[in-house]
Every structure is written in structure tokens, then in C-alpha cells.
Amino acid sequence: MSKKERIEMLEVYRESLKCELDGVEEVLKSLQTE
């Protein structure tokens, strides 16, 4: 795998983790404000 391919794969992975984290933070906020 080339360096460029690895970078692209990691960037996609990072984006999906950000989305997941946003979801977790929203659930956490809603639980904390109950």
C-alpha cells in the first residue's frame, strides 16, 4: 500500500470517528441534562 493510499484510508477513518464521537457527545449531553 502506498503512503498516499494509507493517508486517504486514515482520513476516511478519521471522518467516521468524528461522526461517531458527535453522536456520543449528543447522547451524553442529553443524559447529563435530565
Image (cartoon, grey):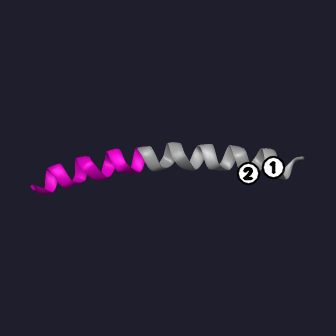
Question: From which residue to which does the magenta span run?
Answer: 1-15
* Callout count: 2
Q: Position of residue 32 (x, y in %)?
A: 83, 52
Q: CA distance from mark 1 to mark 2?
A: 5 Å
Q: Give the residue drawn at x 14%, y 57%.
A: 3
Q: Tell whether 26 sits left or right of 1.
A: right
Q: Give the residue drawn at x 10%, y 56%.
A: 1
Q: Give the residue drawn at x 9%, y 55%.
A: 2
Q: Give the residue drawn at x 30%, y 53%.
A: 10
Q: Position of residue 15 (x, y in %)?
A: 42, 44
Q: For the view shown, which residue lies furthest in the left direction?
A: 2
Q: Position of residue 14 (x, y in %)?
A: 40, 50
Label 2 belongs to which residue?
A: 28
Name which residue type carries label 1: Leu
Q: Position of residue 23 (x, y in %)?
A: 61, 43
Q: For the view shown, which residue lies furthest in the right direction?
A: 34
Q: Tell whether 29 sits left or right of 25.
A: right
Name which residue type carries label 2: Leu
Q: Which mark is residue 31?
A: 1
Q: Tell whether 15 sits left or right of 30.
A: left
Q: Secondary structure at mark 2?
A: helix
**Mark 1 vs 2: CB contact within 8 A:** yes
* Residue 5 on the magenta span: yes
